[in-house]
Amino acid sequence: MADKYAEIKQKLRGSIAPVVTPFTTGHELDLKKMSELIEFQLESGSHGISVTGTSGEPSSMTTAEREKVMENAARTINGRVPFAPGTGSTNHDETMYLTKRAQEMGADAAMVIVPYYNKPNQGALYKHFKTVADSVDIPIIIYNIPGRTAQNLHVDTMAELVKDCPNIIGAKESNKDFEHVNRVMLKCGRDFLLFSGIELLCYPMLAIGGAGSISATANVAPKKVAELHDAWFEGDVKRAQELHYELMPLNDVLFMDTNPAPVKAALGMMGKINPDLRMPMDLPHADLQETIRETLENYGLIAQHA
């Protein structure tokens, strides 16, 4: 039987930019700025767009606000690149609702995070993801980020889900355990779409057969991140390696505080957004902001201090 998701599996590759959610100075959604950020991504060569993932501060938004952000993104993208919004939550019913809404909006896939805080066991995680996947026809990308969810989706659990749910087509692995990531590819199949959510593993993930990355750094340097993937897919391994190492200092500084605080600070310095985050998140301390500024200057992303 032909794979009904074969076409999107071919398209959903490369740098899928996880766009931040801009807020006004009054901490309301700034959808106009968000559309501008998406246009910036498309002009810079990003291969796809995600919103309301970790970089988008979804846990600081109401369900209605997440819907508005997703709808605005879908309108702005207008089919120009694949769209894979984050629809997961610590709340099962909210996850179900937002994933169904993503399908209704015409999203190409939905990215569903391992529920955070609750720490479900592996059987409960299987039941959660299978129930969500069975409720829609849209492709599902599992988002495994144990450093923030306090629970790791085991390789065998993921493989069982892939076997039982044809629309679970990939995973974003924000997992520093590279042995785990290799075993995901082994157990879930070489056509499984594996995306890196760890910046320093974006290039290595491609080398083991990964589909691309969903990297917060793409918010700040989308052209370089996209170029790394283009170079790899074109067979220019040397150029891809050069970009991997060229991006490392920027990757490092953008994760010296909890994402997306440094990314938003950087985008504010670049004149892209009002950098405010919603509480309980906040901008990095002044010393780190100065380090971010110096790094952006070194990369030519903002002008040097006079």
Image: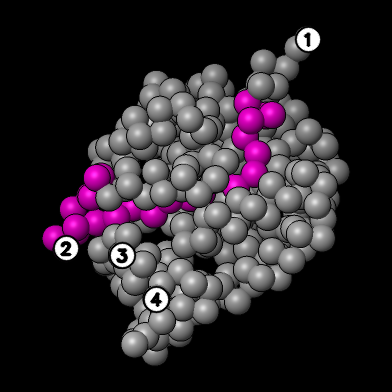
User: Comparing marks 4 and 2, which lies closer to the viewer?
Assistant: 4
Q: Circle 2 — which element?
A: loop
Q: Is residue 107 left or right of residue 225?
A: left
| Residue beneath disc 3 | 271
Precedes in sequence: disc 4 or disc 2: 2
Q: Number of numbered discs present?
A: 4
Give, as a three-letter code, the residue at label 3. Answer: Gly
Q: Write the residue at 32% across / 43% down.
A: 35
Precedes in sequence: disc 1 or disc 3: 1
| Residue beneath disc 2 | 25
Q: Write the residue at 80% across / 52% down.
A: 236
User: Comparing marks 4 and 1, which lies closer to the viewer?
Assistant: 4
In the displayed structure, would residue 132 be above or below residue 7? below
Nearer to me, 48 or 175: 48
| Residue beneath disc 4 | 303
Can residue 178 be found in the magenta stretch?
Answer: no
| Residue beneath disc 1 | 1
The residues tagged by marks 4 and 1 sit, at their Cα atoms, a distance apart of 56 Å
Q: Which residues are magenta?
A: 8-32
**Would you call the spot at circle 2 few (<14 residues within 10 Å), some (14-19), or many (20 or more)?**
few
Precedes in sequence: disc 3 or disc 2: 2
Q: Write the residue at 63% across / 61% down.
A: 198
User: Comparing marks 3 and 2, which lies closer to the viewer?
Assistant: 3
Rendered location of residue 150, percent (x, y): 56, 62
Q: Circle 1 — which element?
A: loop
Can residue 27 be found in the magenta stretch?
Answer: yes
Precedes in sequence: disc 4 or disc 3: 3
Q: Is residue 161 left or right of residue 216?
A: right
